[in-house]
Amino acid sequence: MINPRILGGKPIIKGTRISVEFILELLSSGMSTSDVLKEYPHLKREDVLAALDFATKTVKREEIISPIKISHKR
């Protein structure tokens, strides 16, 4: 869910002020889904999975632009 009035428009877990970015940081720091749920009992497993799904879809849509080699002819 994205609301420009909550966390500057960052994607958040619906019904919370917890950002998708924060969930990803917790998981990438080594926390398991179970650890996250113990630390934030108001979250559900589906919330964590939704954050991962959002990140996956975001990366999938990402466009890679290759650098252009510019030759300097004189």
Image: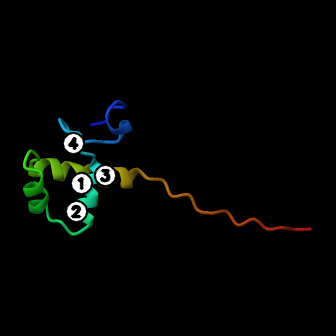
Per the image, label 3 sits on a secondary structure element best described as helix
Place residue 2 in its image quadrant. top left
> Which residue is labeled 4 in the image?
13
Confirm or deny contact between disc 2 and disc 4 (CB under 8 A).
no
Q: What's the distance in space between the residues labelled 2 and 4, CA to CA?
A: 15 Å
Badge 1 vs badge 4, beta-carbon distance below 8 Å: yes
- Looking at the picture, how far across and down is residue 43, in whole percent? 11, 47
Quarter holding the N terminus is top left
Instruction: Decide: few, some or many residues near mark 4? Use Cα within 10 Å; few <14, some 14-19, many ≥20.
Output: many
Q: CA distance from mark 1 to mark 2?
A: 6 Å
Colour convention of the picture: rainbow
Residue 53 point in image, percent of width and height: 24, 51
Question: Which residue shows up at 23% across the image and 60% down it?
Answer: 26
First in sequence: mark 2 vs mark 4: 4
Look at mark 1 in the image and give the residue it sits on: 23
Task: Using the image as rendered, state which of residue 48 and residue 57 is in the foreground.
Answer: 48
Q: Which residue is mark 2?
A: 27
Label 4 near label 3: C-beta < 8 Å?
A: no
Q: Earlier in the sequence, mark 1 or mark 4?
A: 4
Q: x, y (%) of residue 42?
A: 9, 45
Callout 3 environment at 10 Å: few (<14), some (14 to 19), or many (20+)? Answer: some
**Sooner in the amino-acid sequence: mark 3 or mark 4:** 4
**Can you tell which mark lies on residue 2?**
none
Outermost residue toward the front in this view? 39
The amino acid type of the residue labelled 4 equals Ile
Whole-percent x and y of residue 15?
Answer: 17, 35
Q: Label 2: few (<14), some or many (≥20) within 10 Å?
A: some
State the SS at label 4.
loop
Question: Label 3 vs label 4: CA separation?
Answer: 10 Å
Query: Residue at label 3?
Result: 21
